[in-house]
Structure formats: C-alpha cells, structure tokens
Amino acid sequence: MSLYRTLVIFTFPMVYSFYTRYKGMTGVFAWLIKYLVPCLGVSLCFEGFSALNFLLGMVYVYEFYELGYIQNDCETIKKEEIPTLRLNEKELQAYEKCKYLIFAIRIIEILILIYVMYRVRISVSLLFLYAATMLVFYLYNNIRNGFCLVVHLVLMMMRYSAPVLISLNRYELLPILLILFIYPVTLFIERSVKGKFGYKNLLFSKYLMSSYEERYIFRIKYYVALLIVTVLTTIFGGLSSICVIPIVILLVSSIMTYKNKRLQYNK
C-alpha cells in the first residue's frame, strides 16, 4: 500500500468513514438517508441556519469521530480475541508504519478547522463540546459491557447534533431532542434488544420489539408514531413543517427495507 494511498484513506476528512463504514453506492445512500438528511432537515427548521457552519460542523465532528474509528480498527483490535476487522493486513501494516504521521496530520487539520471556525465566529464553547467526542470515543473503545450502549448513544448524539447546533451557532434543546429521536434513539433501542455486550433491555423487549429480527417492522411503527407527534407539534406548537421531511424519508426508507427483506426471506 503506497504512502499516498495510506495518507488519503487515514487523513483526508471523512474518507476513512466511507472507506470502512459506508462502502459503495449503497453505503453512501445509507449515509445520506440516515445522517445527512436528518441533520440538514432539523437544521433548516430553525432560524439562523448557516450552510457554511453546517459543513464545518460536520467535518469537525468527523475529524474526532474518525480518530476514534482508527483507534478502534487499528489499536483496540489488538486487545480483542475475536476482533471485527475493517482493514486488511496490508492496510494495517501501512497504518503501523505511518501512524505517527497520520495522527500528526489529523491534529494539524483539527487546529486549522478550529482557527477557521473561530474566525467565522462559531461559539468557542461548541468547539470545546464537540472536541470531547474523542474522549467519549476513547471510553467506548475501552469498555465492553452493557454500559457501552449508553456511551454509544452519547457518541451518536454528538455526531448528529454537531452540524445542527454549529449551523445555528447556539445551544437549543428542541433541535437536540429532534435529532436524537429521529435516529440515534432507534438504533439504541435495537442494539439494546439485540443483547450486544451481554446486555438486553427487558423493557424494550417486552413493549417495543420482542427480538432483534423484528427491527425492520419496529422502525416503521416508530417513524409512524414520530411522524404523528411531529405533525401535531407542527400544527399546534409552531414547529416548522420542514422537520416532517426527514421523518417521512426515513419512514419510506424503512418500508422499502422491510419489503426487500421480506422478498429475500420468501425466495
């Protein structure tokens, strides 16, 4: 693996995420539906939205998130008996040869981003808040029990809320709640029922979905309920109707996924 290719994969903002987590057109489409559309949709619901701040906020949080991904994929796996391998042997060897250079470049990128965001007058407290993503990810990478699910929920909340709050350049509870319930909460419920890391939420299993195999129909029911609540809030609470759009898109996507899985099962 050439030095150039190694540096592009490990240091160019967001490339590592798409290379290891959102592969191919299917992965890109999933990222658009599950991340970009909800974040952008919620951001546009509130006054003061800045497209530049939105883009900076997204790249900023991914800089820290990808440091966590790299640590997990290249360092944490060394401690695990049955690790999840997202990189092949040559890529891991290339990382080992260049890891100090990789982290140095990442730090420089973050410092440049902080300078640019400071110059466009993004709140310094927001910059400090989302810089803490790396600390939360470090905690996530070093624990493997039921509490890990809670830490993962916090991580998702930070990744989803960063472009929203930074695009508005202020703290506001409603945007955080909206983006939290539009996607991170659904994944948290599903993982809690799945029993990952030896933890299974009995309350979720009893009242929301009895098994992990029911997650596709659960998502449809969840987004129907969320859509009803959002529409009522739009009518009676003055919430912007734009907030309905990402929920409708996720609902349609969930229905399509459910139908595809049913077709595959019936073949």
Image (cartoon, grey):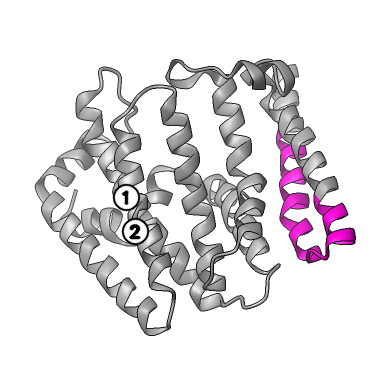
**Mark 2 burial class by Cα count in 10 Å: few <14, some 14-19, many 20+:** some
Task: Give the residue at x 61% y 30%.
Answer: 189
**Pointer 2 with pointer 1, Cβ within 8 A:** yes
Asked if the magenta segment contains residue 127, the reply would be no
Q: Which residues are magenta?
A: 230-257
* 35 shown above or below 105: above
Task: Give the residue at x 60% y 63%.
Answer: 172
x, y (%) of residue 188? 56, 33
The image quadrant that residue 110 belongs to is bottom left
Q: Is residue 98 visible?
A: yes
Q: CA distance from mark 2 to mark 1?
A: 6 Å
**Mark 1 burial class by Cα count in 10 Å: few <14, some 14-19, many 20+:** many
Q: Secondary structure at mark 2?
A: helix
Left/right of residue 27 with respect to residue 122 in the rendered view: right
Asked if the magenta segment contains residue 240, the reply would be yes
Pointer 1 residue: 134
Left/right of residue 186 with respect to residue 159 in the rendered view: right
Q: Secondary structure at mark 1?
A: helix
Left/right of residue 2 with respect to residue 130 in the rendered view: left
Q: Amino acid at mark 1?
A: Met
x, y (%) of residue 98? 12, 51
Pointer 2 residue: 131
x, y (%) of residue 111? 25, 70
